């Protein structure tokens, strides 16, 4: 880890935990009486709290968007490429909040937290969260900071779904929504992939119906398989061909069932790493939130109707080789917004990186991102105007 | 502002909903939004133009006009504009149909291949015309469907398209009495307002 940080890095950041004591009613019918959200912030909130950006994370993300939590950390936060001084989300201009969503495993209240009713970890009894539930919890986070209206809510994949839900649930509370590599709802194929991942976890003997914290064992094999499968779907065929081809680790076939191709060992490595860093119950919960997301369902399956009251401007970005959240899926959102006469822009970026492209700072993607954020910055009401 | 855009903006009603096909860097839409409180979108495929639109706050959608308009509802825009792009379309006739389906009114501008300079170039040099205004050679030009004013107006007759207004200008986009007299020979750019 570098002792000095690049000029465009936010440097060392320390997460903070905020406790909420107002009960949160959830879509599943249950409620959380108390909960905590762990967050990181970057930049400075201005006097009228009008320069705040909320960044929502995807399936396995968390509050650590940018910079380093300690001098020992080897890799910066997951969206460090886009957030920092002079980067698309410029921390000289914006106050940025990243959080770990409820049900997560990075410090916010989730399956690993103690259930006050039993004195034991929630485990599988933690309520199923929906994207709307998250938005509600994020609105309270905005209240905590005195943020009436976000300058923008930004997210990729499942994070983009939260940005879309924000525009529907709280039309007055955001000026811009950036929805990147996302979809208005999952397809049957997408749900099918999620179900295979869930089966891999729940059928691991160490899963113990989700009550594995006490045993000291974790369903490593299940999580590893789930991640390996997920990883394949986040890459493109061309991308994998370029990165691995049919390269062999030992240079020759070994005529046994051990991993020999580079792509095999890559998947093993990724799965292995993930299986010790992520919580199985959180993984199940996040995939369910993805499967359940369908904002048009409450509006007779008419997405244009669902977004009809949205007030913010929208920016959608999709990537050509992303087949898990294909450009056509973003276009469905664009079409609905055009039909509803909402303000929307859309760009389709050429990339071989599949769904992962939204995390990779390719030049055109960063140009679009920066150009749009310039618009977001221009739309920050000046303090002088506010004080007339 | 580009001079042909100056003429077009006079034809756009305040507060109307505009779709600009091939909107370039968003200059016209930004102007219309500010001066006439219009709403709407630009459609563009050029990367630098898209970035320029986004910086200006102009709504821009990256789709291919040749196949990307089907999802837009009939008569959902007051005005659909296409400036200097008809000649690069795969099927200009189908695009004009699509524009008239989506828009209550359409504004189209295109370079006139019947201009005397183009006629003279082909007649005397025996080669496809290259000029400052049409700088490409035949093998690399994006302009794959040139037409003259007469050609376009014949298409309008065949397709039952009403011409509401026609302005013909030279390459500085100026009207001149002689152009009015002999438009297909002396006019370099045509600006049509059409409906069905």
Image (tube, rainbow, N blue to C red):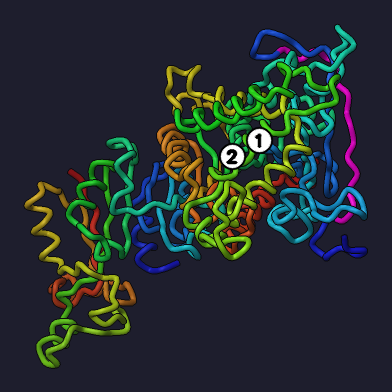
SS under mark 2 = helix
Q: Is residue A263 left or right of residue B98?
A: right
Where does residue A293 sit, x and y in percent of width and height? 56, 25
Instruction: Look at 28% across and 37% down and name the residue there.
Output: B75
Q: Which segment is the magenta one?
A: A11-25
Q: Mark 2 points at which residue?
A: A230
Instruction: Look at 27% across and 75% down and name the residue there.
Output: B170
Q: Mark 2 or mark 1, which is nearer to you?
A: 2
The subunit letter for the residue under badge 2 reads: A
Where does residue A225 sit, x and y in percent of width and height? 63, 36
Identify the image quadrant of residue A287. top right
| A297 is higher (above) or lower (below) than A280 | above
Identify the image quadrant of residue B167. bottom left
Q: Answer whether labels 2 and 1 touch (C-beta < 8 Å).
A: yes
Where does residue A220 sit, x and y in percent of width and height? 73, 33
Identify the image quadrant of residue A221. top right
Q: Earlier in the sequence, mark 2 or mark 1?
A: 1
Q: Nearer the viewer, residue B131 or A9?
A: A9
Q: Mark 1 points at which residue?
A: A59
The subunit letter for the residue under badge 1 reads: A
Q: Which of A115 and B93 is in front in this view?
A: A115
Q: Residue A153 bears which disc, if any? A: none
Q: Nearer the viewer, residue A156 or B72?
A: A156
Residue that sits furthest to the bottom in the current view: B125
Residue that sits furthest to the front in the current view: A255
SS under mark 1 = loop
Instruction: Look at 61% across and 28% down and name the residue there.
Output: A200
Asked if the magenta segment contains residue A21, the reply would be yes
| A107 is higher (above) or lower (below) than B184 | above
């Amino acid at each position: 880890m570098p002792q000095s940080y690049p000029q465009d890095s936010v440097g060392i950041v320390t997460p903070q935990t905020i406790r909420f004591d107002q009960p949160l009613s959830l879509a599943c019918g249950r409620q959380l009486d108390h909960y905590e959200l762990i967050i990181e912030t970057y930049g400075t909130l201005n006097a009228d709290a009008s320069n705040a950006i909320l960044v929502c994370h995807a399936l396995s993300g968390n509050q650590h968007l940018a910079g380093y939590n300690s001098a020992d950390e080897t890799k910066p936060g997951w969206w460090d490429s886009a957030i920092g001084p002079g980067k698309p989300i410029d921390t000289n201009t914006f106050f940025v909040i990243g959080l770990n969503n409820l049900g997560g495993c990075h410090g916010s209240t989730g399956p690993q937290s103690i259930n006050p009713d039993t004195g034991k970890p929630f485990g599988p009894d933690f309520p199923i969260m929906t994207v709307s539930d998250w938005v509600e919890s994020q609105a309270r986070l905005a209240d905590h900071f005195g943020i009436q209206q976000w300058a923008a809510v930004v997210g990729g994949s499942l994070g983009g779904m939260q940005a879309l839900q924000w525009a529907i649930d709280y039309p007055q509370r955001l000026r811009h929504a950036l929805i990147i590599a996302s979809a208005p709802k999952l397809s049957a194929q997408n749900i099918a992939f999620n179900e295979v991942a869930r089966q891999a976890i729940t059928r691991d003997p160490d899963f113990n119906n989700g009550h594995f914290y006490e045993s000291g064992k974790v369903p490593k094999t299940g999580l590893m398989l789930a991640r390996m499968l997920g990883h394949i779907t986040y890459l493109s065929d061309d991308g994998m061909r370029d990165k691995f081809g049919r390269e062999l680790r030992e240079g020759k076939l070994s005529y046994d069932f051990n991993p020999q191709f580079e792509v095999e060992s890559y998947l093993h490595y990724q799965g292995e790493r993930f299986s010790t860093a992520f919580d199985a119950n959180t993984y199940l919960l996040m995939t369910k939130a993805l499967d359940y997301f369908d904002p048009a369902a409450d509006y007779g399956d008419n997405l244009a109707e669902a977004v009809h009251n949205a007030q913010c401007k929208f920016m959608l970005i999709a990537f050509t080789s992303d087949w898990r959240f294909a450009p056509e899926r973003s276009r469905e959102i664009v079409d609905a917004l055009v039909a509803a006469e909402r303000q929307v822009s859309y760009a389709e970026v050429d990339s071989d990186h599949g769904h992962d492209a939204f995390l990779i700072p390719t030049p055109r993607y960063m140009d679009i991102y920066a150009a749009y954020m310039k618009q977001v910055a221009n739309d920050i009401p000046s303090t002088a105007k506010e004080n007339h | 502002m580009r001079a042909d855009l100056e003429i077009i903006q006079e034809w756009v009603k305040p507060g109307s909903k505009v779709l600009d096909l091939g909107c370039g860097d968003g200059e016209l839409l930004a102007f219309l939004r500010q001066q006439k409180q219009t709403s709407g979108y630009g459609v563009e495929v050029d990367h630098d133009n898209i970035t320029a639109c986004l910086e200006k706050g102009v709504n821009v959608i990256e789709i291919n006009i040749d196949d990307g308009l089907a999802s837009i509802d009939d008569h959902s825009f007051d005005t659909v504009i296409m400036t200097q792009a008809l000649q690069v379309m795969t099927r200009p006739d189908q695009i004009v149909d699509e524009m008239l389906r989506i828009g209550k009114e359409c504004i189209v501008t295109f370079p006139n291949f019947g201009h005397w300079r183009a006629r003279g170039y082909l007649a005397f040099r025996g080669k496809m015309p290259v000029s400052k205004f049409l700088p490409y050679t035949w093998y690399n030009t994006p302009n794959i469907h040139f037409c003259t004013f007469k050609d376009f107006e014949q298409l309008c007759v065949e397709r039952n398209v009403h011409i509401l207004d026609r302005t013909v200008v030279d390459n500085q986009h100026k009207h001149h009495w002689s152009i009015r007299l002999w438009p297909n020979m002396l006019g370099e750019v045509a600006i049509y307002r059409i409906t069905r």
